[in-house]
Image (cartoon, grey):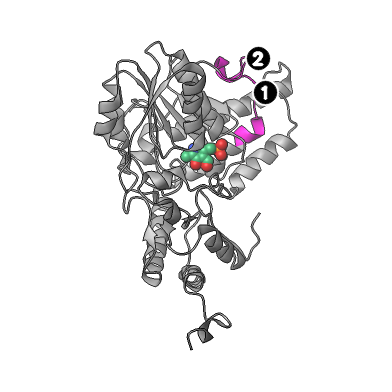
Amino acid sequence: MTSPSETYLDAAATAPLRPEARAAMLAVYDGGQANASSVHAPGHRAKAVLDASRGSIATALGATPSEVIFTSGGTEANNLAIVGLALASPRGRHIVTTPIEHPSVTESCGFLERVFGFELSVLPVDSAGTVSAADVAAAIRPDTTLVSIGLANAEFGTVQPIREIAEAVRASGARLHVDAVQAAASLPIDFGSQSAGSPTAGSRPGESAGLGWPGDAVDALTVASHKFGGPQGVGALLLRRRTPIEPLLHGGGQERGARSGTENVAGAAGFAAAVSAVTASIGSRAAALAVSRDALVRELLTALPGARLTGHPEERLPGHASFVVPGVSGESLLVALDAAGFAVSSGSACAAGKDEPSPALLAIGLSPEIAQTAVRFTLAQPLGEAEIARIVATLAREVTPGPQPGLGERGA
Ligand SMILES: Cc1ncc(COP(=O)(O)O)c(C=O)c1O
């Protein structure tokens, strides 16, 4: 939890809880928690909340309610998409993915390789972390069941050319899964299931933002509540109608048989409230974040001439600024910034705390030593000029520490 004197700059790990999400969850708890499958009145009320939450999430993301499968978060939704779609497909045992995916994607692919003998094609990315649609097209074979590519990378924020990638996959007949966990809280998402004439279609923010959504060419898309400012431990897989999927969790057949287990009604309500609040103002929010991000990038690169921005200079998430600062460990920068009241990450939250350099940073061509110097700022709200100045001054002190006692005398 952050205190009032702290500035939270780790929204890519978990965004601060939105008041709308908190209120929606409290309303469920205070109204009397019940099981949405129960046939009594409290059960019907729980089911109504669940249905309404599913409807709001679908509307906000351009899906239909029946395409929303609630899960325990992004990790489970990615596992369900990859393992569930691959095992349900008769096409074969080949998967195309990239080296910069979240571990819930890479480890799910690794599981299929280890246990079911799938073959993986792990495509290269360029130094900005961009995947080439031509490489995707070239990698797809007649036995390719699934292509899984993240819309935006968690560590360096690069946004992929999703329309071109989707068009390459669509032509092949393989399925496309997009992990949109990082992207969905700041870029408009359009799953493409709402008709042009639907009442919500014209008002969705995605339609004028130029992300270039590929109609309905994405078969499955992952989102996680806590990146929107909703509660942790709830997420969803959007799954295109009539797409066969093998469930991972077997039991009572909830979520139309794709994910058994008593639904997290309060979590779904908080998730829906956060998604609705974020998507209602996504364009203006993204623009405001990008102004702060650009100022931070500019000031930091000016003050620390050795530092480099990682990821794509333009095609990146609006609130995402990530750097390597050769000569200083990312961990020490994180500790110094934390002491100064800035909560940042030294990489992705999942990679942080591990000794090995991040595979995603190695994949964009950084050496293991340089990859260890990564520091990531992900904004939940715009930063003031004074905060940016304090961040930069704190880093500058770490990179060029003042004279140490005794050191200056050595050569004298
Ligand atoms: C790109 C991406 N995918 C998936 C996940 C996993 O989501 P969750 O933390 O909800 O399990 C994360 C988490 O940070 C992520 O950044």
* Residue 345 among those drawn in magenta: no
Q: Are marks 1 and 2 in contact (CB under 8 Å)?
A: yes
Residue identifier under label 2: 252
Q: Secondary structure at mark 1?
A: loop
For label 2, the crowd category at 10 Å Cα-Cα, with few meaning under 14, some 14 to 19 and many 20 or more, is few
Mark sitting on residue 262: 1
Which residue occupies 58% across, 62% down?
A: 335
Q: Magenta-highlighted stretch: main secondary structure?
A: loop
Residue 112 position within the rendered picture, expressed as x and y whole percent measured from the top left: 48, 22
The residue segment tinted magenta is 248-269
Residue 265, placed above or below residue 259: below
Amino acid type, residue under disc 1 in the picture:
Thr
Residue 364 position within the rendered picture, expressed as x and y whole percent measured from the top left: 36, 46
Mark sitting on residue 279: none
Name the quadrant containing residue 163.
top left
134 vs 57, nearest the viewer: 134
Residue 104, placed above or below residue 378: above
Give the residue furthest to the bottom: 412
State which tag comes first along the sequence, 1 or 2: 2
| 51 with respect to 304 (left or right) | right
Whole-number angstrom distance, CA of label 1 to CA of label 2: 8 Å
383 vs 397, nearest the viewer: 397
